[in-house]
Amino acid sequence: MSDSDPSPGGSTDKSATPSSEADARLRGALPPDMAQRVRSARLKDGRAILVAEAGDLSKGARVELEAAMKLAVTRLDDVSEVHIALTADRQRRQIITVGSGKGGVGKSTLTTNLAVALARMGRKVGVIDGDIYGPSQPKLLGTEGERPVAQDDKLVAIESPHGVKVLSMGHLVAPGKALAWRGPMAGKALGQLVEADWGDTDILLIDLPPGTGDVQLSMMADSKPDGAILVSTPQDLALLDAARAGQLFEQGDVEIIGLVENMAGYECPKCGHISDPFGQGGVERFAQALEIPFLGRIPLTIETRLAGDKGVPPAVEDGKAGKPFHAVAERLARWLDTGAS
């Protein structure tokens, strides 16, 4: 059989570049970090088709990757049309941080209840207690006294009684023991919690420590979050600290999903009168001024405090204390699915 004869099983396509040559040329047009994502590449009649792995990327990063790959491949002389197909063989967990800029504003309680509310919606959720020096998630999620096992050099997340996985330094050190760690050590510890074995979890909520220090910087550098929720009480002092936390996330190119006003009004359990010990509406006005979504208000209630002490978050039920958390969780779920809260 001559070279020009049809090959067995079909005719020779002279318009197509041999697959190995096309694959090498198309990969060669890409930066190394993009080329290693390519699973297959074809070139025929000036039409390039690349299949690339992008399951570990956020929605925004996938869009950027596709645009950058198209631009790079289009520069080849014999390419007139480029099609990019992004696959998701490696599922990337969405990482959402909950920060405040200061302590005492109920950030940990919000994180816990958002996680429980999302789990009740059918989401597979994990909570990371990023407050290395003052962990509270073991108590809030009813896992005090439990210790995670290690498998393949990774910690395995603990299953809480409420359908939410959790890991905290509170699971690894003796109760009440103070950690005298410098910032880099604390940042490394948080990284180990993020890289733990989270099973089929697809959303990780990170309960950040207060402030804008080494732990936050290390987290953004090593495990860049998809978005951040800011928590504040209504008074001006807390809002100033929340603004600083917001600036930190903006500098790290982390989208701010929205603001939550916590301890927004106190209803007397005896007479029903509502007072505002921390002011009223400050966070919503602050959000409007900065054009940041306002996600909702969480009132100050005895039920929420007692439930937290018992390790039974109010969001496990549909009662009055749990409804505000569910409302905020619904806004967060919408952002996770659509990018808009």
Image: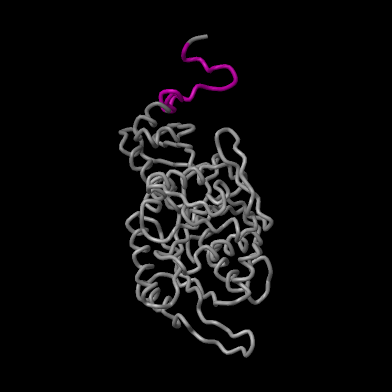
Q: Residue at x 48, y 64 (%)?
A: 340
Q: Position of residue 289 (x, y in %)?
A: 35, 76
Q: Residue at x 52, y 54 (%)?
A: 129
Between 264 and 291, the one nearer to me in the picture: 264
* 213 in relation to 306, above or below: above
Q: Residue furthest top?
A: 1
Relative horizontal placement of residue 234, taking residue 177 as reference (left or right): left
Q: Which quadrant of the figure has residue 257?
A: bottom left
Q: Position of residue 279 (x, y in %)?
A: 44, 82
Q: Which residues are magenta?
A: 3-22
Q: Residue furthest front?
A: 177
Relative horizontal placement of residue 144, taking residue 232 as reference (left or right): right
Q: Position of residue 95 (x, y in %)?
A: 49, 52
Relative horizontal placement of residue 185, taking residue 193 as reference (left or right): left
* 172 in relation to 264, above or below: above
Q: Is residue 161 one of those drawn in magenta?
A: no
Q: Position of residue 272 (x, y in %)?
A: 61, 88
Dominant secondary structure, magenta:
loop
Q: Which quadrant of the figure has residue 268?
A: bottom right
Q: Residue at x 54, y 17 (%)?
A: 7
Q: Which quadrant of the figure has residue 76?
A: top left
* 268 in relation to 154, above or below: below
Q: Is residue 11 one of those drawn in magenta?
A: yes
